Amino acid sequence: MGSDRRSFLKKALAGYAAAKGSMLFASAQNIPPYAKGARKPGKVDYKRIATEEAWGPPELFKMYIDLIENGALTDPGFVSMWGRFVRNTALIGQLQDIGEKRIRDMDAAGVDKMVLSLTAPGVQIFDAATANSLATSTNDQLAEAIKKHPDRFAGLAAVAPQDPRAAAKEMERGIRKLGLNGVIINSHTNGEYLDDPKYWEIFEAAQALDAAIYLHPQTPPPDMVMPYLARGFERAIMGFAHELSVHILGLMTVGVFDRFPKLKIVIGHGGEGLPYMLYRLDYMYENARYPFMKKVRKLPSDYMKENFYITTSGLPWAPAIMMARSVLGIDRILYAMDYPYEYVPEEVTLTDNFPMTAAEKKKLFQLNAEKVFKL
Ligand code: MN
């Protein structure tokens, strides 16, 4: 580990120590500016299906604490984020509950159904063997919870990219045997991205199963995180969007979607800013392309329109979502809340009030999710 890395890790650990006993993260108490004054959600004539909703079992958080406290970990972004989160008993309680308490929160927010996924970075921070067995056991637990409340919950299968063959198998088991509705991958795996062909067995399996992959962000990997960490930007404020944008552009520009043209990728947070940038991405990909970059068949905007779906998680903001609709079309946009990290019932009302037709809202909240995740 270089001395730079070591000093940033020290900083992250200091942040973790400072967070002990305090409540740095309080989702429900912090009403975002545009949601202030909004009404609580009322009755509507569509089902509200939220598609980026996090959960995690107690043993996962125990393992995170162990990773942080044994001092062997070399991922400062992880230490910074989970060092705080594991001390937030309210948040951990919400993440662990995939039963009655969560359903009460859903009722209070007018959410009919949640598509649950293992919270970031899920199993992707562990060694391959640990990650595989944890993916299996968490998928079993998730399937149990769905069986108890099939009208309220659906879920995505967690997989361990550390072992692509095992990941492909677990994906198949999760979907065919457990009846799960797609796949969750929490972006980079120990600093590696799925644009590396050694991971493409995962895409092959997803395409064969016609299973959508939800690509959820996480903190930037060690080689990227330092300037973010020094400024406190490594998490949802900006680090997530940048980290996942690199991943997404990487998939487009190495030809993943030429090789797997039917692959379906779902990304949250209004598409991590990418819909807004499509003109520039297309132009720069053609005109500022490095010689080492592969010549792929289509432009970034084409892949975005053919292989991607975006969700409204953490971005219940009409100007952004209407812009995305104008370039991607309403069929590519799904509703999501981002529970429990963002649990603000007033945001549901903001989304209900988007300037769209009734038919478009039914697609956004219900029909698109039913189609993409085969609910
Ligand atoms: Mn999320």
Image (cartoon, rainbow, N blue to C red):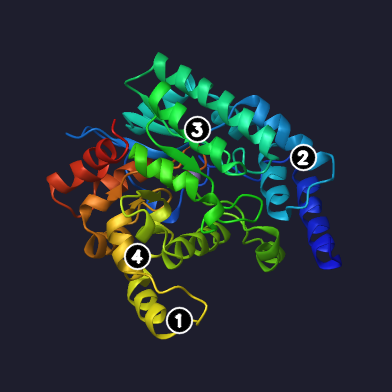
Q: CA distance from mark 4 to mark 1?
A: 20 Å
Residue marked by disc 1: 289
Kindly report which numbered mark, 3 or 1, lies closer to the viewer in this rendering: 3
> Where's residue 314, x and y in %?
43, 50
Kindly report which numbered mark, 2 or 3, lies closer to the viewer in this rendering: 3
Tell me the crowding category of disc 1: few under 14, some 14 to 19, or many 20 or more residues within 10 angstroms, Cα based: few
Label of residue 210 in the image: none
Q: Name the amino acid, label 2.
A: Leu
Residue marked by disc 2: 67
Residue marked by disc 4: 275
Which element type, helix, strand or loop, lies under badge 1? loop
Q: Is mark 1 within 8 Å of ligand 1?
A: no
Q: Is residue 319 visible?
A: no
Q: CA distance from mark 1 to mark 2?
A: 40 Å
Q: Residue at x 71, y 51 (%)?
A: 80
Q: CA distance from mark 4 to mark 2?
A: 36 Å
Which element type, helix, strand or loop, lies under badge 2? helix
Q: Name the amino acid, label 1.
A: Arg
Q: Is residue 325 left or right of residue 60?
A: left
Residue marked by disc 3: 169
Q: Residue at x 30, y 46 (%)?
A: 334
Q: Name the amino acid, label 3.
A: Lys
| Foreground pick, 180 / 237 | 180
Q: Name the amino acid, label 4.
A: Pro
Query: Marks 1 and 4: in contact by CB < 8 Å?
Result: no
Q: Is residue 103 above or below residue 111?
A: above
Q: CA distance from mark 4 to mark 3?
A: 33 Å
Q: Quadrant of the N terminus?
A: bottom right
N-terminal label among 4 and 2: 2
N-terminal label among 3 and 1: 3
Kindly report which numbered mark, 4 or 1, lies closer to the viewer in this rendering: 1
